[in-house]
Amino acid sequence: MIQDKELDALLTTFQPVEPTDSAEFMSEFEKRLNAIDIALAYHRAEVERARKKAVWAFATGTVAGLILAIIALALPSPVEMIAFSIHSRFLLTFLEYVPYVMMFFCATSIAFGIIEFMNRSEEMENLLAEMKKYEKFAYNVQVCTDTESKMICGINVVQYPTDHYQLPAVVEQSIENLQKKPVIVSADCIYGTLYNLYYLKQKGISVRIPTSKQSNNAIGKKSENKYAIEYFVFDEKRNVFICPEKQELTQDGIYDAQMQKGGFVKKKIIYSNYQACKDCPNKSKCTKSQHRTITRYVHELSLEAEQIMNTKEGQEDYKQRSRTVEAHNGTFIQVYNYDRLQVVGLEKTQEVMFKIAAAYNTIRLFNITQKEGIDLSYVINKIQSI
């Protein structure tokens, strides 16, 4: 049963979060976006020009053909009368071929119109195909959902094309809305950056973020090639990888990986077994190099998150994610069409998404009142006070 204090927290208004990411855009990235905008504008103009030419060619060809057909049908009568009156055999002979000549020009004009229309249509298709090369993202929507109530606690809109560093902003919004921090945060593997993991550790929030390999194993996604990296088993105690042929790849070197956002650096550890690969009969199926190497990126934060996800508790917690936030995405697309919003600008898009979240939460809240037996008048009074 949901208590009154918890219900008060769930009814907290959504406060827009000022987008901090837009200020961090690199100048090179902005130049690329501007170049894409210019290319799209050019191709749209070319498509419209080709469309007008196609319609004009078809219309002129058809009109010219119809005019010639009318002439072919109407001309013989008056000319024939003149020919008989002056007894001109030449005119009479000419009149026998006029309908055929006129109909030929009629058919030719219409045919040329159709051919030109098809050519322009093909040109339009080529231009539209070219435009696909310049497709770009618009906005990236981040949603934070309460696992138990399935209500949206925070929603944030940014202009970054990836989710790597978006977790802190939406979690902060959830904390502000609920006036308390979550105990556990579960997110997709793309959020497993050291920047996000460090933020959650500082907040004292437990993490349920798998590695890409753990995520693939959870959904049963595996490569058909039995020598793919997911078939190499890591023995943490002995610090070795065991390949599908039961050979051990030992540590060959350790280096500093490229620095991530926030100044974090992972250790890049290389594992290999030159002699085992040299004698392996299936080497060609495993690698095109002289020997197979496995690279492992290690940091205390990511290692801790990986170890949690290896536990049964961590895996059970992560499974609940598909029934909460992932379900919202399908509802938003099918019911609210949030992937095709008819607004322009980050601020307006945020406002629309807040309204969508509020509408969703209102429906969800009504369902909770029915299920939990909460007094509906109390809920209505709380909504009116917002």
Image: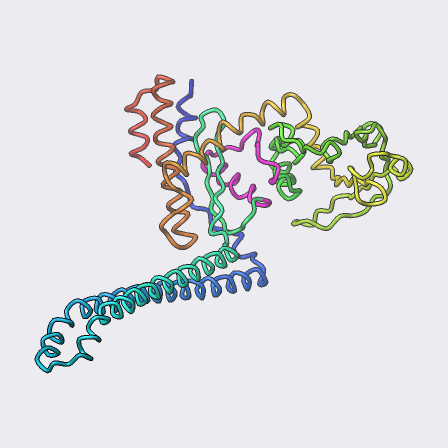
Q: Write the residue at 81% across / 30% down.
A: 242
Question: Vertically, is 146 above or below 170?
Answer: above
Q: Which residues are magenta?
A: 164-191
Q: Position of residue 353 (x, y in %)?
A: 40, 43
Q: Quadrant of residue 15?
A: top left
Q: Looking at the picture, how far across and down is residue 25, in whole percent?
A: 56, 57
The one nearer the camera, 290 or 58, is: 58
Q: Quadrant of residue 195?
A: top right
User: Any magenta on residue 173?
Assistant: yes
Asked if residue 111 lies left or right of residue 204, the reply is left
Residue 304, can we see it?
A: yes
- Asked if residue 116 is among those painted magenta in the image, a careful observer would answer no
Q: Does residue 37 lie above or below 228 as drawn?
A: below
The answer to whether 236 appears left or right of 72 in the picture is right
Q: Is residue 340 left or right of residue 380?
A: right
Residue 151 position within the rendered picture, expressed as x and y whole percent measured from the top left: 43, 30
Given residues 167 and 177, the one toward you in this image is: 167
For the N terminus, the quadrant is top left
Given residues 21 and 254, the one toward you in this image is 254
The colour scheme of the drawn protein is rainbow
Tell me the residue at 41%/40% (across/down).
Answer: 14
x, y percent for residue 364: 38, 28
